[in-house]
Image (cartoon, helix red, strand yellow):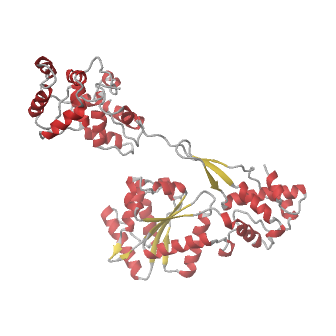
């Protein structure tokens, strides 16, 4: 079924529809005579009498007249070409285009006004918006319109500003493509049935014959206190090799997964086995405020630089010289940053420049980042800003305890000189693992999925509640039935 011809259609559109002439036939003929026309360009000519800015317009007109003579009258064809094909500028879709021309403002300046807010917005993007009504898919309309309105407010009147986004002509592209803005993907929502966090009661300690808190936050005092499964051992070894080999490495893990303990274990291992490795850690707590200047100060301090040059070039040379001298003295260097998911893109770019420092084939410094899963997203290939860094970065994720849950519980009680099997039975451990299976949903973006949440901190808190409840009920052990009763 053909689409009805609009009442306000151009003479050319009316002619093609009334004589049932296919658009493809017209475009093929133009291509044959050496004047090919893109579909969007032809639609602008057909629907808005806007002639193409490039090509031989007179040749296009003659080709169309010759083609249409076979189907229509001379009067129809004459009426069709009332508008001269020469010197007619395409009209912008939105009032924004007309205002830029009126006030002699450039599309480059408009793009910079949007980019200044911290988003990526190019000149081709604003050209598509003005000429075709195409909104970028990765940004919301507000991210574009608000900075443009603020910038144009310096030049245009309030009336012109109010009409900024009024369509001057009907866009030639399909509505689905024009109006599609960035769909906000809902933040993952985790559903996990956990009781409120409690403290381990003194009566509970007495009930189970404990003289030391097995799950205290400060119970890790030496490497022997660390629980190291195959995953943790593999991760530590990867950190060591990256640090010694001049690589970039990132460790990600959920809150409570044990990232800080892995870091402590790594430092302890390095101190004992690789004392030549100098670990440099910026001490700023809020990594969102970490700057290249702070990183420079940390490097200078650890390298024992007494005088810090003022100029950027001199500073860079001084750092490189100090690293080379340290390397010749037998040292290796690694810059380690915790909470790295809070780093800005600019700092990550700076880290890549630091990593590039070398003495011939020898890298002067390695980089190890430790952070929550947001770090994985920040270093994703889709983040074009940090692609130079992310493409050189190896990454490992700290997994939940999973199959090692029983070994972890046994280890924690063993460090208190207690046999875990006398406090919690095997069926209860299985029940704990089942209770710590959450469901994570992503809105309409992805289907919901199960999420294993047997991370050390969550396991610790859960077992404290179970022990308190067992002591309160006078139960000698934690059983699967008791785990089921925990609310």
Q: Position of residue 340 (x, y in %)?
A: 50, 59
Q: Position of residue 184 (x, y in %)?
A: 49, 41
Name the side, left or right, on which 151 lies relative to 418: left
User: Based on the displayed image, in which of its 4 quarters is residue 346 positioned?
Assistant: bottom left
- Residue at the extreme right of the image, as rendered: 474
* Observer able to see residue 466: yes
Q: Position of residue 125 (x, y in %)?
A: 31, 41
Q: Residue at x 22, y 25 (%)?
A: 16
User: Based on the displayed image, in which of its 4 quarters is residue 419 positioned?
Assistant: bottom right
> Is residue 225 positioned above or below 42 on the image?
below
* Observer able to see residue 311: no
> Is residue 427 positioned above or below 67 on the image?
below
Name the side, left or right, on which 404 lies relative to 156: right
Q: Residue at x 65, y 74 (%)?
A: 223
Q: Count the marks.
A: 0
Q: Position of residue 359 (x, y in %)?
A: 34, 76
Residue closer to the observer: 43 or 181:
43
User: Based on the displayed image, in which of its 4 quarters is residue 22 positioned?
Assistant: top left
In the picture, the quarter occupied by the N terminus is top left
Q: Residue at x 13, y 26 (%)?
A: 70
Q: Residue at x 21, y 29 (%)?
A: 45
Residue closer to the observer: 73 or 367:
73
Name the side, left or right, on which 269 lies relative to 123: right
Residue closer to the observer: 202 or 45:
45
Name the side, left or right, on which 244 lies relative to 32: right
């Amino acid at each position: 079924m053909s689409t009805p011809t609009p009442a306000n259609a151009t003479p050319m559109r009316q002619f093609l529809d009334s004589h049932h002439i296919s658009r493809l036939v017209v475009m093929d003929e133009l291509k044959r005579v050496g004047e090919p026309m893109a579909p969007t360009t032809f639609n602008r000519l057909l629907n808005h009498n806007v002639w193409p800015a490039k090509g031989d317009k007179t040749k296009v007109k003659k080709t169309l007249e010759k083609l249409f003579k076979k189907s229509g009258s001379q009067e129809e064809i004459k009426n069709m070409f009332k508008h001269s094909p020469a010197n007619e500028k395409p009209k912008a879709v939105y009032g924004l285009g007309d205002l830029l021309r009126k006030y002699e403002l450039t599309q480059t300046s408009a793009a910079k006004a949007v980019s200044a807010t911290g988003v990526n917005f190019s000149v081709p993007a604003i050209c598509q918006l003005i000429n075709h009504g195409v909104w970028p898919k990765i940004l919301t309309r507000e991210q574009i319109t608000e900075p443009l309105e603020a910038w144009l407010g310096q030049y245009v009147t309030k009336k012109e500003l109010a009409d900024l986004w009024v369509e001057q002509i009907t866009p030639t592209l399909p509505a689905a493509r024009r109006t599609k803005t960035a769909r906000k993907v809902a933040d993952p929502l985790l559903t996990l049935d956990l009781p409120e966090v409690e403290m381990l009661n003194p009566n509970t300690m007495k009930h189970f014959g404990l003289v030391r808190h097995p799950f205290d936050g400060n119970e890790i005092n030496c490497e022997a206190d660390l629980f190291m499964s195959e995953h943790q051992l593999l991760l530590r070894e990867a950190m060591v090799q990256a640090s010694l080999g001049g690589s970039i490495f990132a460790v990600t893990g959920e809150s409570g997964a044990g990232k800080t303990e892995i870091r402590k274990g790594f430092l302890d291992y390095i101190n004992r086995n690789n004392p030549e490795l100098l670990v440099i850690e910026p001490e700023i707590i809020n990594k969102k405020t970490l700057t290249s200047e702070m990183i420079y100060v940390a490097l200078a301090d650890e390298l024992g630089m007494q005088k810090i040059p003022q100029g950027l070039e001199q500073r860079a040379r001084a750092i490189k010289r100090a690293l080379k001298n340290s390397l010749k003295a037998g040292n290796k260097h690694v810059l380690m940053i915790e909470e790295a998911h809070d780093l800005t893109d600019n700092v990550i770019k700076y880290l890549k420049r630091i990593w590039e420092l070398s003495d011939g084939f020898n890298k002067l410094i390695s980089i190890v980042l430790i952070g929550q899963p947001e770090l994985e997203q920040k270093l994703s290939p889709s983040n074009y800003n940090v692609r130079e860094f992310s493409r050189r970065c190896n990454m490992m994720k700290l997994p939940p305890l999973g199959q090692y849950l029983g070994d972890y519980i046994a280890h924690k009680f063993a460090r208190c000189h207690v046999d875990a099997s006398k406090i919690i039975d095997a069926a209860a451990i299985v029940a704990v693992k089942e209770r710590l299976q959450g469901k994570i949903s992503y809105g309409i973006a992805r289907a919901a999925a199960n999420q294993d949440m047997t991370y050390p901190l969550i396991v610790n808190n859960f077992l404290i509640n179970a022990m308190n409840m067992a002591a309160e009920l006078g139960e000698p052990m934690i059983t699967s039935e008791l785990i089921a009763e925990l609310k």
